[in-house]
Image (tube, rainbow, N blue to C red):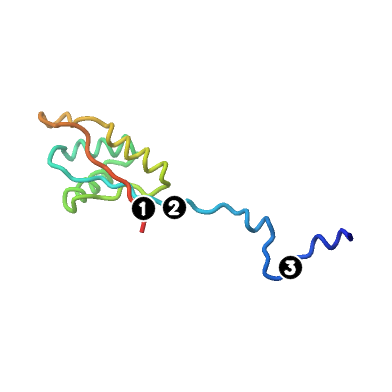
Amino acid sequence: MDESYSTLVWPGRKLASQDARPKRQPRYHVFLWNDDSHTYEYVIAMLKQIFGHPVGKGLRLAEAVDREGRAILLTTTLEHAELKRDQIHAFGKDPFIKNCQGSMSASIEPES
């Protein structure tokens, strides 16, 4: 067989290298849920430590959680979203509230 024949592209067919492009992973939201057992100071400190959010952004997110019942903290891959949710759940009690039972609640949901 002639070597030049192997370089032909058939109409309607893609080259293997065109099909090898990585596909984007599905994205997930990390939600923080409101409760009455945590202070703004706690939420701001948690967001700074876990997500690296500056105080101003932490305050805006804490206000959104308080006002709306929940807020999206991050949209990312499933594995990263699970990690951040688990870090929120492991953050511990609010030292500013005597009867605090534990960490805040967080969940992940697919991006719409």
Q: Quick one: label 1 or label 2, which is nearer the N terminus? A: 2
Question: Which residue is label 1 attached to?
Answer: 110
Q: Mark 2 and mark 1 in contact (Cβ < 8 Å)? A: yes
User: Disc 1 marks which amino acid?
Assistant: Pro
CA gap, disc 3 to disc 1?
Answer: 39 Å
Q: Residue furthest front?
A: 1
Q: Residue 71, position in %: x, y?
A: 25, 50
Q: Residue 79, position in %: x, y?
A: 42, 42
The quadrant in which the C terminus is found is: bottom left
The quadrant in which the N terminus is found is: bottom right
Question: Which residue is label 3 attached to?
Answer: 10
Q: Residue at x 24, y 48 (%)?
A: 60
* Badge 3: residue crowd in 10 Å (few <14, some 14–19, many ≥20): few
CA gap, disc 1 to disc 2?
Answer: 8 Å
**Secondary structure under the numbered disc 2 in the rendered image:** loop
Q: Quick one: label 3 or label 1, which is nearer the N terminus? A: 3
- Work out whether residue 74 or residue 25 is closer to the camera in this orientation and state it: 25
CA gap, disc 2 to disc 3?
Answer: 32 Å
Q: Residue 22, position in %: x, y?
A: 57, 52
Q: Quick one: label 2 or label 3, which is nearer the N terminus? A: 3
Q: Residue 51, position in %: x, y?
A: 34, 40
Q: Residue at x 29, y 37 (%)?
A: 88
Q: Residue furthest bottom?
A: 11
User: Disc 3 marks which amino acid?
Assistant: Trp
**Secondary structure under the numbered disc 1 in the rendered image:** strand
User: Hey, which quadrant is residue 45 in on the image?
Assistant: top left
Left or right of 68: which side holds 3? Answer: right
Label placed on residue 26: 2
